[in-house]
Amino acid sequence: MKKINISIIIFLLTMTILAQSTKSFHDFIVKDIYGNDFKLSSLKGKKVLVVNTASKCGFTPQYADLEKLYKEFGNNNFTIIGFPANNFMGQEPGSNEEIKSFCQLNYGVTFPMMEKISVKGKDIHPLYSWLTQKKENGIMDAPVKWNFQKFLINENGKLVDYAKPKTKPYDDKIVNWIKN
């Protein structure tokens, strides 16, 4: 009986330590597309859809629906953040300035865009390391498979789910998550 009680206590202490050591989305500071620090803690209380983007991808037209989704639901409780990345077949070759212009001219993007980063590999950005690895986020492994993979972050900065690149912004999974 004592062995069982000690095992349970050790297990509960371990789980408590792991829960406290797991970072939150809000712990990160990234750079916006203008090169300024953007504290993700400023998004506390909001659901956040994080998307890795690219200008020369078959999924690039998703920018239009992302912007529409942002205009429809983007308020005090929801936002979208785009992270341009050139990890897949060189489909985001431009500079931050070129990406910003492309997004505004072609899709009227008004949701926050961050600077171009790496979303996989040896030079993966720390935020994407957190988003994609259970050992860091405490929830799941979700390696980025292609451009326009979407991560769903709750109001408390916890990863709750992700949507594959082919999943359109107005998919029921995403819209229902925003509404509930």
Image (spheres, rainbow, N blue to C red):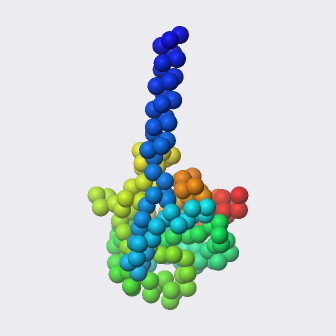
Q: Is residue 161 above or below residue 115?
A: above
Query: As drawn, which residue projects farthest toward the bottom?
Result: 105
55 relative position to 108: left or right: left
In the figure, residue 48 lies in which quadrant? bottom right
Q: Residue at x 61, y 61 (%)?
A: 45
Please provide percent x and percent y for residue 155: 60, 58
Quadrant in which the C terminus is drawn: bottom right
* Residue 167 seen in render: no
Badge count: 0
Please provide percent x and percent y for residue 5: 52, 17
Q: Is residue 165 above or below residue 156?
A: below
Please provide percent x and percent y for residue 177: 66, 59
Q: Residue at x 43, y 61 (%)?
A: 28
116 relative position to 123: left or right: right
Q: Residue at x 56, y 70 (%)?
A: 80
Residue toward you, 29 or 82: 29
In the figure, residue 31 lies in which quadrant? bottom left
Query: As drawn, which residue projects farthest toward the top?
Result: 1
Query: As drawn, which residue projects farthest toward the left?
Result: 122
Residue toward you, 117 or 168: 117
Q: Is residue 108 above or below residue 167?
A: below
178 relative position to 83: left or right: right
Q: Is residue 17 above or below residue 100?
A: above
* Residue 106 seen in render: yes
Q: Residue at x 55, y 85 (%)?
A: 108
